[in-house]
Image (tube, rainbow, N blue to C red):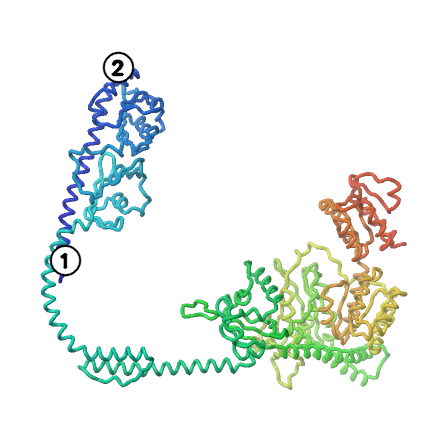
Amino acid sequence: MLITFYRLIVDDYTQLVVERESVQIERLASELELSLKQRVLGLEAFSTRFLDDNNELLKTQSLQTLLSKPSVARELFPDGLLAFDANAVAIAESIYVPNRLGTSYLDRPHFQRSFLTKKAIISEPILGRVTGLPLLSFLQPILSSDGEIKGFVAGLLDLSNTPLIDSKVALKDDSSVFSVVVDPRHRLFVSMQERFTSPQRLPPEGTDAMVDAALSLASAGTLVEYNEKWYLVATEKLDTLGWIALRAIPYEDAIAPAKASYRHFLFITLCAMVLVSLVGVWMARSLTRPIEKMTHRIDKMVEKNTFDVDLQEQGGPEVRALVRAMNRLENERKAANATIRDTERFLSSVLEAASEFSIIATDPNGLITSFNKGAENILGYTKLDMVNKQKANIFHLDSEVKARAAELTAELRKPIEGFRVFAEKAEAQGVETREWTYVHKNGEHIPVSLVVTPMRDEAHNIIGYLGIAEDITERKRIDQMKSEFISTVSHELRTPLTSISGALGLMVGGSFGVLPEKANKLLITAHRNSKRLALLINDLLDFEKITAGKLQFDMQVQELTPLLEQALESMQEFSSERRVTATLTTNARDTLIKVDSQRLMQVLVNLLSNAIKFSPENGRVSVEVETFNDKVVVSVVDHGPGIPEAFRTRIFQRFAQADSSDTRAKEGTGLGLAITRELVERMGGHVDFESVEGEGARFFFELPLMQPINNVSVVNHMNTEITTKTQRILVIEDDADVANLLRIMLKEAGYVVDIALTGQDALNRLQVQSYDLVSVDLMLPDIGGLDVIRKLRQDSETLNLPIVVVSAKVEQGRLEISGDVSNIDWLAKPIDQQRLLNIVHHQLSLKSERHSRVLHVEDDADLHEVIRAMAGEMFDFEVARTLEEARIKLKQKPFDVILLDVSLPDGVGWELLPEIRASMPATKVVILSGEDIAVQEASKVEAVMLKSRLSSQELLNGINTRIQTSKSS
């Protein structure tokens, strides 16, 4: 009620003040309008005296005299009158200001408007160009009788000194009233509460509440907060200039009378309330005394940290209900505390019981906050040594942390260092599992699998990190034993199987004459099952390598079609046995792909063997090739029973078979398609299938094209005819049975074969005998097969000798050699005769088609590109920019021809000549010079060509001539 009464009084007084202020602001605006019009009319009347009888502007002296005399205009403009000529140049003044006369004001906007309108203009508040004072300029054009501007007369008001309204008629306000006049068009103050000495621009919108209220023409009675005080405002717009006047009275002053009235009323009311309150206090005291006693007792229990539940139920019903609630609440609190203690003990027990796992918690900066018993066991430190004393990275190898930091910095493109190495990925992914090496207190290195997880509070802010590490020393040891066991099994299984399968193949192929029919059937069965056993062993070992991530890929750009033809050829015997026809359909014979040829062959054989196996007798299997933009699709299509709907989701799973019973009709391990998918995806492709049950299946894989089709000419090495009568092959194999088997297979194909049972024997033979190809087993009794290969590649005489690795440890060899040497093919035991002969044929084809090597020693890159383009694709070009680079390349490989520039950045080309003659006596040197070479120097080399007169034909002839000379010698 009091508040309502107060509001009524305040509203009444506010309304009275608003009505009064509305009248005041209207009066102020009217007075201001009248003052401006009076000055404009006075100046207009005064301007009629500035022309002589000839309608010309008075002389300067006359104008000066006129301005200096007392007049109404001087009273209206106490801050000065000015006369201007027709070009707005000041020529006379009533008040002297240095340097003002002679100044042009034509650039002033109000002068320009007066020129255009030929009417009196009142300027916006401006800064005097000479005086530097805030001015309001009243400008009147002086017009002749025909309306021509002869000059101007201007009256000035100093806004910092002269009021716009005569003090006799101005409103008498106390200091608390706020008045302001603004020019909204030019966003300037015309009159301000405080005195100003320069034109003041209106502040930006939203920064001055009073200015915003004026510009928005706030209605009378609007409340505005200004300088931490509330004002009642009223506004009025001037019709003449569009200025806006604003009056504001403090709201507190406006409602002060209302407050005084309310205080009187309040005093009377309070007196009455005091009397009532005294009576109420006496009554409440008697009611609340039991609650006070109970509260005092609770405070004592809190201070002593001892709680009981024997609060006595005394007092009225409300008090007794409160006591019962307090007792119940205390019982629940005790139960909750007991649960929390049990949970803490349980978690502590779990941490301590995990003695085989290191569990370490840190704060956000890596400082250790928890260190369990397992961490003490694994690292050798105690909890007292670590908690709140050390950071977690104390257990890590500094080299590992730096390497991981560099890896993360490159991946995330921001600097990662210190403890952030462990936290960055965990924060981004929620958890990170990674192998690290812990350093025991005694310096021992312990491999661990560390799981790092961020810990967050209820607001999802990170409060620390939890690291759980498992010692994987034993797992590593078991993995090593497993790898060694598989390697041994691989060799010990494949080597005897090679002899068995090869010998059976030779016998079945008729190498030992015609056999009795029964014996021949038995041998065919034995040979077929030996192949099945070989495939089973290969699948199991490949599966293990894929699982371990140890499968090596030798990715090379090559033609697809020869690989498909080779795969079909290798499956010809199998398809004939099954009476199935396999064909190739392609419209892109020059398709280039980047693959590991042996892995792609494995994929094709898997798909073809499945298609043939499930095709009906006299059925047809087709290999189809299609190209789409930047990829090639190879499909293997059969017309067999198709794939059952229930099996399709599992078809690429390991050991998956549509019929997995022990009585199934089709043999196999169920690993072929799983391996196929892994191989294709590792080579950057994708494999899938389509099938209609009862109509057949289409398995296809996609691989990226390396170049547009038909844009590159590639030689099909598989179809190159080679005369084998003079081809000599050295077989390096420690197992005499396998060596003899290889000799028989190769001799049947027309090759001359020598055998070396040790690595040293092979190296000795290569010193005295030239061979066209070498077959190497990796497991030799003295020198390892890989060491033999490296020695061959280090010798310039055998640098380009084709090598075929025939071993049970092909994958291990490929991994170890890691692309260090070239011109090598790999064949895993047990040996497939046709596959062996295809590889040998392919390697010898590459040898016969090898382009001649040319080393161009030239520092001008553009010239090298021109020379290379002139030579075309007939030669293998390499470039060396300096003498030092040329020396390195000469040590790496031999060259047939060297094109040598004389002037190089680090010396003279002639310095290389002795080194070339010493290391490569058969290599021919051709000098490419920009100037003539002396006869004596030219005789040291095979030819000299001038760059300025060099043509494509001359270059080709020069190189070819030297190559032919080199070969004939």
Q: Say if residue 592 shows up in the picture.
A: yes
Which residue bears the numbered disc 1? 6
Q: For residue 946, which quarter of the picture?
A: top right
Give the structural element (helix, strand or loop) at label 1.
helix
Name which residue type carries label 2: Asp
In the drawing, does residue 137 fall left or right of residue 539?
A: left
Give the structural element (helix, strand or loop) at label 2.
loop
In the drawing, does residue 291 fall left or right of residue 344?
A: left
Residue at position x 76%, y 62% in the image: 822
Name which residue type carries label 1: Tyr
Viewer-proximal residue among 419 and 112 = 419
C-alpha distance separating marks 1 and 2? 73 Å
Estimate the x, y position of residue 423 in percent, counting from the top left.
52, 67
Circle 1: is it few (<14), some (14-19), or many (20+) Cα within 10 Å? some
Estimate the x, y position of residue 516 in percent, counting from the top left.
84, 84
Q: For residue 147, which quarter of the picture?
A: top left
Q: Quadrant of the N terminus?
A: bottom left
Which residue bears the numbered disc 2? 52
Q: Which mark is residue 853?
A: none
Viewer-proximal residue among 694 and 951 = 951
165 up-or-down from 365: above or below: above
In the displayed orientation, state which residue is furthest to the top.
54
Q: For residue 308, which quarter of the picture?
A: bottom left
Viewer-proximal residue among 2 and 185 = 2
In the drawing, does residue 463 fall left or right of residue 733?
A: left
46 up-or-down from 878: above or below: above
